[in-house]
Amino acid sequence: MVINTKLSFAFLLFSLFFLSVTFSLVVANVDPELQLCKRQCWVHHEFSHRQRRECEQKCEDYHGQKHGVGEGEGEGGGGSRIVLNSDTDPEKQLQQCQKQCERQREQQKEQCRRQCQETYERQRGEEGEEGGGQSGEKDEQGRQQGQGQGQGQEQEQEQGQGQGQEQQEQNPYVFQDQHYTTSLETSEGRIKILQRFHQRSRLLRGLKNYRFVYLEANPQTFVLPAHLDAETVLYVASGRGTLSLVSQGKRESFNINQGDIVRIRAGTTVYMINRDKNKKLRIAKLLQPVALPDEFQPFYGPAGENPESFYRAFSEELLSSALKVEQDRVQRVIKQQNKGVIVKASEQQIQALSQREEAGMFSFPFGSTESKRVFNLLSKEPSISNRYGRLHEADANEFQQLQDIDIAVSYANITKGSMEGPFFNTRATKIAVVVKGEGYIEMACPHVSQQQQQQQGQGQSRGEQGREQQQSASPHYQRLSSPLKRGMLFVAPAGHPLIVVAGNNRNLEIVCFDVNAENNRRESLAGDKNIVNALEKEAKELAFSIPAREVDEVFAKQNEWWFFPGPRGGHAYA
C-alpha cells in the first residue's frame, strides 16, 4: 500500500512536470520574445539557480503585462537584460540590454548584442506597423511632439548653437550616438551600425534600402576578412591603411589615405590593416543591401569562434571532403580565433601587409574594364572655393566605379565662423557625417509642420478641420535646427533648403553621400548665382508683391557664392 502511494505521488509529480514543460513550450512557441527572455536568464553565469528561476518568473510577469494577462504591476529589469519596464522606450531598453551584455563572457558578447538589437528592431517594427498607414505616421508625430512642449514656440526662441537636447530629439533628420549600435567591438576597435533610417522617422522611408556603418581601428591592427550581401561605398575619414579585395581567387591590395573613396561590390571579400603607428583609422560606409531590403550581414570565412566562421555551419564530413583534409585538422583551423573582428598585428606583419601593393599582386578586373579602384576626393580641385569654405565633389563622371550605384560623394570644409548655403539639391538626398569640428544646421521642412497640423486636427470638429485646410492651402515650412559635433549624422532630403554653419573655434568638416545623384543639380538660394536674381523684374514684383528694386537690394547684395561669412563672423551685414 505504501509502495502504491509513493508510485502514485511520483506519477503525479511527473505529470505536473510534463504539463509545466508542455505549457512553457506552448507559450514559447506563441511568443518567441518570452522564450528568448527565459533563455537569457540562464546565460548570466553570475546568477544562482534561485535567481534564474526568479528571472524566469519575471519574464512571465512581463509577458502577462504586455499581453494584458493579469493585473499585477511587477518589476521590470530585475533579473534579465530583456525584462524591462513596459513603459520604457525601445531605445532605452536597447541601451540597458547592451550594458548587460558587457557582463557576458567574451565569446558570448556578440550573440548577446545581436539579440538585443533583434528585440529592439522587433519592438520598433511593432510600433511602426500598429494601426498601419496614417496611424503609424501619427504615432511618429506624437513621439516627436511629446518630447518637448510647444515645438514651434521653442524653435522661434532658440537659434543656432543654442538649440537644446529636446529640440534635437524632435528633429527626425538628425542622428546622434544613441542611434548607433556597436555590433562588433574589441579592445582594438569597433564597428558601429546606424539604426535604419525609416525607423527614426517615416519621413526617411525613401532611404529604406540604405544603411550607414562607421569603423574605427586602433593603430597597427588587422580587420578580419569578410564579405557583405550589400554594395558599399566607403570614405576614409582619417588615418591610413591598406585595403585588400579578393574575388574569383585573385587579390587586389592598395593603400588608402584620408579622403579616399572606394567602391566595393557585394560579395567581395574585404580585409584591411591600419598601418599607422599612432592614429586611428576611421572609415564611413554607405551600404545598399542586395539580398533583403534594409538588411545586411557580414560573412566571416577566415575566422573561428569569435567572430564565428561560416565554415563551421557545414557538416564536418562534407567540409572535410571539399577541402580534402581530415576532419580534426579542419576543425582545429576553424575554431582557434576568439579575439574578435579587429585584432592587434605585429610590426612585422603590418610591414608585410603594407608592401603587397609594390609586389604587383593586385591587378585583376572584378568584372570591369576600369582598373582604378581608389579616388582621392581631397586631391581633386574644389568645385567651389573661397575664403569661407571649399567643396570637393565626385560623381560617376569623375569616379567611374560609382556609375551603376547612383551615389555621389562630397566633402565640405567650412571655415570657422562661416556658413554653407542656403541651398538645396534637386534630386539627391544628402546623408552627411561630421568628420571634424562643430557647428549647427537649419533646414526648412514642410513635412514636420504637416504632421503637427494633422495631429492638432484630431481634436477639432469636421467644420473646424475644413476651415483649417482652407486656410493652410499653401505649405508651412518648419525650421528644424540642431547643433553638430563630430560623429553626428544628418539627412537633407531632395528639395529641402539647408544652411550649415561652422562654429567660431575651428573649421567644420563634413563628408556627404548623395543618394539619387544622377542628374542632380545644386541650387543656390543666396549670393551671386541665387535663383531670385535670375527672375525678370516683373516676376520679382508679382512673386514678392513689392517693387523689384527692393527685392534686388536684398538678394543682389551678396557677391560671394555658396560659402558666406556667418552671423557671428563679424561682417555678415556690413
Image: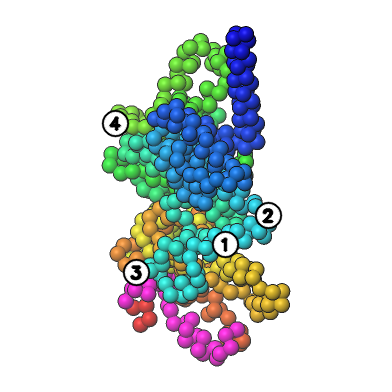
Q: Which residue is mark 1?
A: 142
User: In whole angstroms, how far apart are the C-alphas of marks 3 and 4?
Assistant: 42 Å
Which badge, 2 or 1, is on the more N-terminal residue? 2
Q: Secondary structure at mark 2?
A: loop
In contact (CB < 8 Å): disc 3 and disc 1 = no
Say whether residue 557 is magenta: yes
Viewer-side label of 3, 4: 3
Q: Residues within 10 Å of mark 4 (few under 14, many from 20)?
A: few
User: In whole angstroms, how far apart are the C-alphas of marks 3 and 1?
Assistant: 36 Å
Which badge, 2 or 4, is on the more N-terminal residue? 2
Q: Residues within 10 Å of mark 3 (few under 14, many from 20)?
A: many
Image point 62% across, 24% down: which residue? 16
In this picture, is 519 found above or below 574? above
Query: Residue 424 or 481: which is nearer the viewer?
Result: 481
Q: Which residue is mark 3?
A: 417
In this picture, is 528 found above or below 241? below
Say whether residue 328 is magenta: no
The percent position of residue 497, horizontal first and vertical second, equals 52, 69
- Name which residue type carries label 3: Gly
The percent position of residue 219, horizontal first and vertical second, equals 31, 39
Which badge, 1 or 4, is on the more N-terminal residue? 1
Q: Secondary structure at mark 1?
A: helix
Image point 42% across, 62% down: which residue? 165
Q: Which residue is mark 4?
A: 347
Query: Residue 129 or 279: which is nearer the viewer?
Result: 129
Which badge, 3 or 1, is on the more N-terminal residue? 1
- Name which residue type carries label 1: Gly
User: In whole angstroms, how far apart are the C-alphas of marks 2 and 4?
Assistant: 56 Å
Quadrant occupied by the N terminus: top right
Residue 132 numbered tag: 2
- Name which residue type carries label 2: Gly
User: In whole angstroms, how far apart are the C-alphas of marks 1 and 4?
Assistant: 55 Å
